[in-house]
Amino acid sequence: ITVNDFLSASTSLVLSDDAQAVAQANSALEGVRTFFIIITAFVFGLAGLTFVTATFIVPQAASRLEEDTKRIKPGLWEEYEAKLLEGETMAQRPDLLQELGNIMQPLIIADFEESADAKGTSPVKKDKNIVDNGDQWSD
């Protein structure tokens, strides 16, 4: 064994230890990188969902609530519009929209049930009891 062989072997051992350390560091950095990519994707997804909700869903819900409120309880919508500031819409004030929705929900449900009863297509048959006749499969 010559000195050159010894130096070559020791250098390759040092380089292989360094390479192993670099590989481990890269592996750890890949995990951190993946973590931040997932967090970034989650933030962008949440921002997109918020945008879609604010742009499409809330205005549509406000429009539907306006129709139902004006039909079932005239004057109530105008009362809530009077609470808005200059240039605001109900879609921009979710607190007022929620409050009005809480007031109108039982009225809208009652109106739906009345219209279903009037059509003869009640969503729930109140006079039918399957326990009395013993045959749960008959209508």
Image: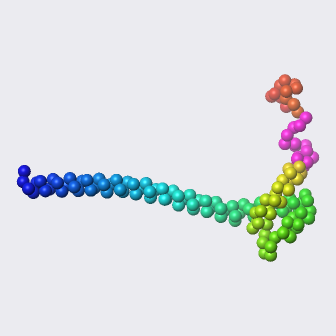
Q: Residue furthest left?
A: 2
64 in relation to 120, above or below: below
Can you see residue 100?
A: yes
Residue extent of the magenta highlight: 112-127
Q: Nearer the viewer, residue 14 or 115?
A: 14
Q: Quadrant of the C terminus?
A: top right
Q: Residue at the location (22% across, 55% down)? A: 14
Tell whether 87 sits left or right of 28: right
Is 51 included in the stretch rendered in magenta?
A: no
**Coordinates of residue 84 in the picture (x, y in percent):** 81, 70
- The colour scheme used to paint the residues is rainbow
**Coordinates of residue 66 in the picture (x, y in percent):** 84, 62
Q: Quadrant of residue 79?
A: bottom right
Q: Residue at the location (78% across, 69% down)? A: 89
Tell whether 118 sits left or right of 101: right
- Tell me how many marks there are: 0
